[in-house]
Amino acid sequence: MEKIGVVIAAHGDVPLDYDLEQAEQIMEKISDMVKKLPRNIGEINDPHKLESGKLAEKVKAKTGLEVEVGYSEFCSPSIPETINQLASKGFEKIIVVPLFLTHCRHTERDIPEILEKVKKQVTNVEILYIEPILEGIADILAEKIMKNINKNSNPGKET
């Protein structure tokens, strides 16, 4: 039997107890500049934004709910802009789902801080924040790995 290993390519994060104030100020400036760049006009230059939009459409089709994408950095619309947009359309409850597989600085600190600020602005809307996609992720990864292995003896990029 062939010996096969698996690499989970992860984003990486800074420890929560690290003082990030100066780095965050620099990143915020970069994020503000990058948000203004044109996206996916002609050729695809931002596959993350494209795929996030496709994912939102799939979730909308499966749930029948209005599903929009809001970004914490580097892209627009922002999470607060998206929440405000839904609130202005009369939505009374908004569920915020992090597009992260595990807990990280974004899920533990950044997004909750964003939501606390938004809750003070949009007082007539209930905003719920749910956990990252931890449950079932091992089953999904195992299924994808085995499907790829079984596809042929040379595992490659799955479509």
Image (cartoon, rainbow, N blue to C red):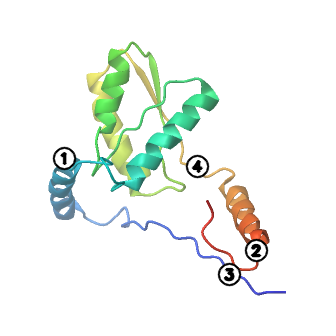
At label 1, the amino acid type is: Lys
Task: Tell me the CA gap for discs 1 and 2.
Answer: 43 Å
Secondary element type, mark 3: loop
Quick check: marks 4 and 2 in contact, CB under 8 Å?
A: no
Give coordinates of residue 148: x percent, y percent: 71, 68
- Which residue is labeled 4 in the image? 133
Task: Tell me the CA gap for discs 1 and 3.
Answer: 41 Å
Q: Is residue 64 left or right of residue 151?
A: left
Instruction: Indicate which label's residue lies in the foreground, 2 or 3.
Output: 2
Q: Residue at x 72, y 82 (%)?
A: 4
Observer able to see residue 97? no
Of callouts 1 and 2, the N-terminal one: 1
At label 2, the amino acid type is: Asn
At label 4, the amino acid type is: Ile
Task: Tell me the CA gap for discs 4 and 3.
Answer: 23 Å
- Which residue is labeled 1 in the image? 36
- Which residue is labeled 2 in the image? 152
Q: Residues within 10 Å of mark 1 (few under 14, many from 20)?
A: few
